[in-house]
Amino acid sequence: MFGSSAAVASGEKFVLISHAPDSDSWWNTIKNAIGIAGEQMGVDVDYRNPTTGDLADMARIVEQAAASNPDGIIVTIADYDVLKGPITSAIAKGIPVVTINSGTREQSEMLGALAHIGQPEYDAGFGAGKRAKAAGATKFLCVNHFFTNPVSVDRCQGYADALGVDLGDQMIDSGQDPTEIKNKVMAHLRSHPDTDAILTLGPTSAHPTLSALDDMGRSGDMYFGTFDLSGEIAAAVKSGVISFAIDQQPYLQGYLPVVFLTNMSRYGVWPSGAINSGPGFITKSNISLVEQYAGVYR
């Protein structure tokens, strides 16, 4: 049985294209996932991304990938309008495309992709906001380190809607420089002293925010939730400084498309519908189950 499986392996070549800049360590889990899936399936998976996170560069990378005629493209919908052309052109050439991470199931279907594997971002933000409201939060700060990605705003908007407040100036465009993020968070909290909750959108913004709160003597002083996981975030959850981390299970976003595309290439089989890889909420009560895998499988 194992011998017959190996016999059909044809060394397919896939390309995974993300919107993340080189500085975003969160994507290491997805890089690990495609490496493992590639080895298990006997295929090559090339990870590509715009060095600085520029979406125009990302669009060009999608075009270049399509020109190489891979057996499949895995891509994030960081901005539907910017990426619509390159993605639909790839699909028109007959290249199977799976969308992951950023974007929605509806956008993926409109593009003509086979499926979307990711987390409904508005729903995840709304779920985070419900937790904050139950804890008594009324005024919050959403630290958005990837403001150019429209889906990032959905996270903050969902949070605001769950609290029943306007988003307004409670979301800041923090940029991605750690020092700049820290300074902007401190400035906002000084000018809005009644802020009682914080939402960060991943390690890039969570780590400097932790430092800002520590410097201001406010660690553990407000309801702090974040998207995604890292070693530093896991430690903050254990200590009670961060109340929860939203796990969208990036490992699945990298691993599953490679497995699915390989099986479609070889046997013509494909699962039905989109796959929600998250959200899951990591708290002090369950952090011990996942912290050992942070940055690798979680």
Image: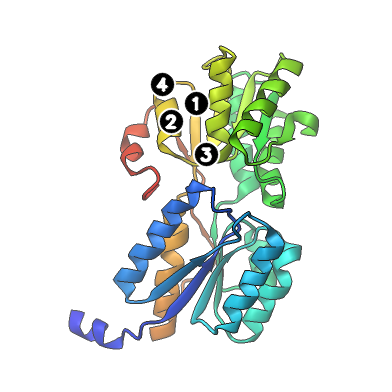
The three-letter code of the residue at mark 3 reads Pro
- Mark pair 3, 1: CA separation: 15 Å
Q: Which residue is mark 4?
A: 239
Q: Which residue is mark 1?
A: 243
Residue 230 lies, in percent from the top left, at 44, 39
Residue 268 visible in image: no
**Which of the two marks, 4 or 1, is nearer to us in this view?**
4
Disc 1 secondary structure class: loop
- Mark pair 4, 2: CA separation: 11 Å
Verify CB contact (< 8 Å) between mark 1 and mark 2.
yes
How many C-alpha atoms fall within 10 Å of the one at disc 1: few (<14), some, or many (≥20)? Answer: many
- Rendered residue at 41%/21% (across/down): 239
Disc 3 secondary structure class: helix
Verify CB contact (< 8 Å) between mark 3 and mark 4.
no
Image position of 181 with respect to 123: above or below: above
- Rendered residue at 33%/74% (across/down): 41
Q: Which residue is mark 3?
A: 203
